[in-house]
Amino acid sequence: MKAVGAKRVVGMNVGAAVIAADNSGARIARLVGKKKYKGTKGRQMSFAVGDWVKITVRKGLPEMKGQLFDAVIIRQKKPYRRLTGERIGFEDNAVVLLKDDKGNPKGTMIKGAVAREVIERWPHIAKIASIIS
C-alpha cells in the first residue's frame, strides 16, 4: 500500500456509523476493525481517510444486512492538513465496499466526492470516482 500525501488525522473510532457511497446495495455501515492493524493491548483502533477497514452493513439490501465486508474510507468529517498547507474536511463520513483483496470496488459508481489521498493509494477506486477533491 502506498503512503498517503497528507498529515493523517484520525476522524473515527470503532462503532462509528458511515455512509456507503457506492451502488453495492449497502446504505449505512458500522466500522468494526482495521485490516493489517498491529496495536497495543487495550488501545482502541482509530480510522482515517484512505484506511482499509472492516464494516458491518446496518441498512441496505436484506441479504447484506449483518454481513462483514472490507471497505475503504473515502471521506471524513474531521479536517486534516494536506502537504500544500490547505485543510480539507467533508460533510460526512463515507466508505466504498471492496469485493476482493486487490482493492477492486464492489459497486460501479461512487456518489459524491472522493479524497485525493484515496486516489493515490487505491487506483481501482479512482476509475469509478466521479468527483475528486
Image: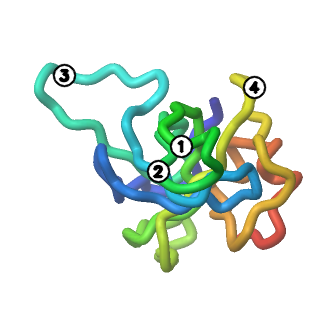
Is disc 4 in contact with disc 3, using a CB cutoff of under 8 Å?
no
Q: Residue at x 51, y 45 (%)?
A: 57
Is any part of residue 60 visible from this angle? yes
Badge 4 marks a residue whose secondary structure is loop
Residue highlighted by disc 4: 102
User: Of the residues shown, which amino acid type is indicated by label 2?
Assistant: Arg
Report crowding for label 3: few under 14, some 14 to 19, many 20 or more residues within 10 A (C-alpha). Answer: few
Report crowding for label 2: few under 14, some 14 to 19, many 20 or more residues within 10 A (C-alpha). Answer: some
Q: Gap in Å between the C-alphas at discs 4 and 3?
A: 27 Å
Return the x and y of residue 3 as percentages of the image width and height.
58, 39
Residue closer to the observer: 98 or 119: 98
**Marks 1 and 2, the one that precedes in the sequence:** 2
Image quadrant for the C terminus?
Answer: bottom right
| Total count of labels | 4
Is disc 3 in contact with disc 2, using a CB cutoff of under 8 Å?
no
Q: Is residue 101 left or right of residue 83?
A: right
- Of tags 4 and 1, the one toward the viewer is 1
**Marks 1 and 3, the one that precedes in the sequence:** 3
Residue highlighted by disc 3: 40
Q: Is residue 59 above or below residue 124?
A: below
Residue highlighted by disc 1: 65
Q: Residue at x 35, y 59 (%)?
A: 11
Is any part of residue 55 visible from this angle? no
Q: Is residue 104 above or below residue 84?
A: above
